């Protein structure tokens, strides 16, 4: 291990709120500040040592405009000397912040960095940028001329289901299982160490994810109408939920962790990117995973836990088919179909789930990947240290 490695000391998230739910009235900056202050409360470090806060956010308009990463630092009451920046790699934005933080630590630009992100989809819904001429349409004239279509993730999910021969029953079974896994993780207290409860404006405290639908079954989901294609297989119940939330990951070098008296949970072993067909859009986690495994020298069987974002049920199911990964190791606490998908926060939310699960279960290696607008994906392999 190098003195200039990149380790994860802690990771924390808010409960994920459903659209127009309990978190909807909280400002994106304030919810971001909440997870920053939670990291300090949990680990006792002086925020003045943080070299940068790298924050993911997709819809950077309205309350999410004006560099929400820097504003979160100020809202947290941290020293003005702590900078912050905001990143958009679509749904992978906060996973990309983890990659940027790791690169900065390994290269010597940082000793301490915080990666994470936020998305308040109740206040800044998908398509909010469409109010500005051409901003709501990905690409420009030349991109649209090249592909001749309007990019749409739901249509891409239908294309995936068709390409991999995934039936509606398979998709709905997977989706109901996501809710069952989240229910079990919640009831068994496995998420308590991941979540920083949020005090709400009315005095209540939200401490659990609002998207959970207990008793969800494939039979119940069978009654929902297709959302993107007549006679199709993709509907609201086998797609990720529109959500509000924030998550943060405390990262530093091993030397700095020792200096501060902190114990790392894991180190970033491999961080890669991949691009794929931007029309189907959702397939890049497959080549990203294969690239990460090759670069790390590990096999899929070496990985004890996987977090693959459940943007739509065909994404993890096609990923399983192509990688040969053990389904029992996938999304053990449920995924975005049950938890929700606050876009800019989801990468850090997945990492929070992964690192805490690996620590609790004594798992050596974990891999995280997620599809992103434009046909991209990040993949990250971490190695447990605690």
Image (tube, grey):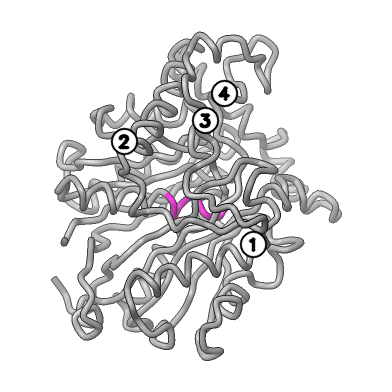
Sequence-first disc among 4 and 2: 4
Q: CA distance from mark 2 to mark 3?
A: 17 Å
> Is residue 345 within the magenta segment?
yes
Sequence-first disc among 3 and 4: 4
Please tell me the numbered disc located at residue 312. Answer: 3
Image quadrant holding the N terminus, namely: bottom left
Q: Residues within 10 Å of mark 3 (few under 14, many from 20)?
A: many
* Residue designated by label 2: 332
Please tell me the numbered disc located at residue 28. Answer: 1
Q: CA distance from mark 3 to mark 4?
A: 9 Å
> Is residue 353 within the magenta segment?
no
Q: CA distance from mark 4 to mark 2?
A: 19 Å
Tell me which residue sits at (47%, 15%) in the image: 217
Q: Main secondary structure of the magenta part?
A: helix
Horizontal and vertical percent position of residue 73: 55, 77
Q: Residues within 10 Å of mark 1 (few under 14, many from 20)?
A: many
Q: Which residues are magenta?
A: 344-349
Q: Residues within 10 Å of mark 2 (few under 14, many from 20)?
A: some
Sequence-first disc among 1 and 4: 1
Please tell me the numbered disc located at residue 237. Answer: 4
Horizontal and vertical percent position of residue 81: 52, 91
Q: CA distance from mark 1 to mark 3?
A: 25 Å
Tell me which residue sits at (44%, 40%) in the image: 309
Q: CA distance from mark 1 to mark 4?
A: 26 Å
Q: Secondary structure at mark 4?
A: helix
Is 24 above or below relative to 188? below
């Amino acid at each position: 291990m190098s003195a200039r490695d990149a380790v994860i000391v802690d990771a924390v998230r808010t409960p994920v709120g459903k659209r127009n739910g309990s978190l909807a009235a909280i400002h994106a900056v304030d919810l971001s500040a909440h997870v920053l202050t939670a990291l300090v409360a949990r680990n006792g470090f002086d925020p003045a040592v943080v070299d940068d806060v790298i924050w993911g956010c997709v819809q950077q308009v309205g309350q999410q405009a004006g560099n929400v990463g820097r504003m979160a630092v100020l809202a947290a009451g941290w020293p003005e000397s702590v900078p912050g920046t905001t990143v958009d790699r679509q749904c992978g934005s906060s996973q990309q912040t983890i990659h940027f933080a790791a690169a900065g630590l390994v290269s010597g630009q940082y000793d301490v960095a915080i990666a994470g992100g936020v998305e308040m989809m109740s206040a800044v819904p998908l398509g909010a940028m469409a109010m500005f001429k051409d901003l709501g349409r990905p690409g420009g004239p030349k991109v649209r001329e090249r592909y001749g279509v309007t990019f749409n993730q739901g249509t891409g999910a239908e294309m995936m289901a068709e390409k991999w021969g995934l039936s509606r029953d398979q998709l709905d079974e997977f989706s109901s299982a996501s809710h069952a896994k989240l229910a079990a993780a919640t009831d068994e207290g496995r998420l308590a160490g991941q979540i920083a409860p949020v005090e709400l404006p009315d005095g209540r405290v939200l401490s659990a994810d609002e998207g959970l639908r207990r008793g969800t079954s494939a039979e119940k989901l069978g009654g929902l109408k297709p959302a993107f294609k007549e006679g199709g297989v993709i509907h609201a119940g086998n797609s990720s939920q529109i959500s509000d939330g924030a998550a943060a990951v405390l990262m530093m070098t091993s030397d700095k962790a020792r200096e501060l008296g902190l114990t790392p949970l894991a180190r970033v072993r491999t961080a890669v990117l991949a691009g794929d067909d931007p029309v189907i859009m959702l397939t890049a986690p497959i080549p990203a995973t294969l690239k990460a495994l090759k670069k790390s020298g590990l096999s899929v069987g070496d990985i004890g836990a996987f977090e693959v974002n459940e943007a739509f049920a065909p994404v993890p199911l096609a990923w399983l088919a192509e990688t040969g990964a053990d389904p029992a190791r996938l999304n053990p606490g449920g995924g975005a179909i049950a938890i929700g998908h606050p876009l800019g926060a989801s990468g850090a939310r997945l990492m929070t789930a992964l690192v805490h699960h690996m620590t609790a279960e004594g798992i050596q290696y974990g891999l995280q990947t997620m599809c992103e607008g434009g046909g991209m994906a990040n993949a990250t392999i971490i190695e447990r240290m605690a």
